[in-house]
Image (cartoon, rainbow, N blue to C red):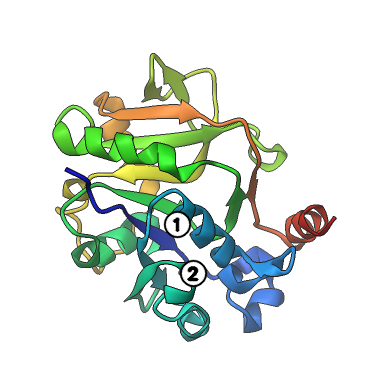
Amino acid sequence: MKRTRRAIVLAAGRGERLRPLTDTTPKPLLKVGGRTLIERQIARLVAGGFTELVVNIEHLGEQVENALGDGSRLGAAIRYSRENPALETAGGIARALPLLGDEPFAVVSADIHTAFDYATLGPIADAIARDFERHAAHFVLVDNPPWHSGGDMGLANGRVARGKPWFTYGNISVFHPASFAPLDPNAKLRIFPWAYAMVDAGRVTGEYFGGDWDNVGTAEQLAALDRRLSA
């Protein structure tokens, strides 16, 4: 049976390190190579078969909603999960859970640019659906960038582990909705360290991605990516 591919695009962050740019423009709507960060993410997701999307919004969220609309011009169906105040990553997913359905879904940040092929996450979502007790989530890990040289976690026999070699969480993952069901949908909660309980229980698979990946957190990173994509 072909499953509907759903994803949540996390777009509620304030983008403090990108001020003053983000005082008037939400971070997901900053442009690189002539196109907004979030539109680039959505295009990659749609190309990978993830066409039913939830976008969580808070800071200047009406601008994001006005820019994307219902998603039809991008080949997607978009619904919005509104937060006030912003609930961090895990909290935002818990709030959006009624919009995400009962099947495993992808989680991506609006402020990364990557060549990762999201189509590869489809079979992983199916595997999580078949055996949630053994396989609760899947993380995509990348090389440690200079600004996060210590990394977040490692890989051992296809499972995520808290040990060497250290990699950085690439802000790309797949989760089963049951993982978030016990959470308060109005509480602020980051994805880490909350998700480490599943890692420690051996329930999280992972993969290393060595291709293009940028996390746009500062004006310098934004300008560098813009130059690269405009060349």
Label 1, secondary structure: give it. helix
- What is the quadrant of the N terminus in the image? top left
Q: Are marks 2 and 1 in contact (CB under 8 Å)?
A: yes
Residue 102 versus residue 123 in the image, above or below: below
In the rendered image, is residue 132 in sight?
Answer: no
List x then y, in percent, for residue 145.
67, 38
Q: Image check: 177 left or right of 105?
A: left
Residue 220 marker: none
List x then y, in percent, for residue 69.
44, 81
Q: Residue at x 15, y 31 (%)?
A: 131
Image quadrant in which you'd find residue 39: bottom right
Image quadrant in which you'd find residue 230: bottom right
- What is the quadrant of the C terminus in the image? bottom right
Q: Which residue is tagged 2?
A: 74
- Label 1 amino acid? Val
Residue 70 versus residue 12 in the image, above or below: below
Number of other residues with Cα within 10 Å of mark 1, as a class: few under 14, some 14 to 19, many 20 or more: many
Q: Residue at x 53, y 81 (%)?
A: 67
Residue 46 marker: 1
Q: Image check: 156 left or right of 182?
A: right
- Label 2 amino acid? Leu
- In terms of depth relative to the viewer, which is nearer, 105 or 188? 105
Q: Image check: 166 left or right of 173?
A: right
Mark sitting earlier along the chain (2/1): 1
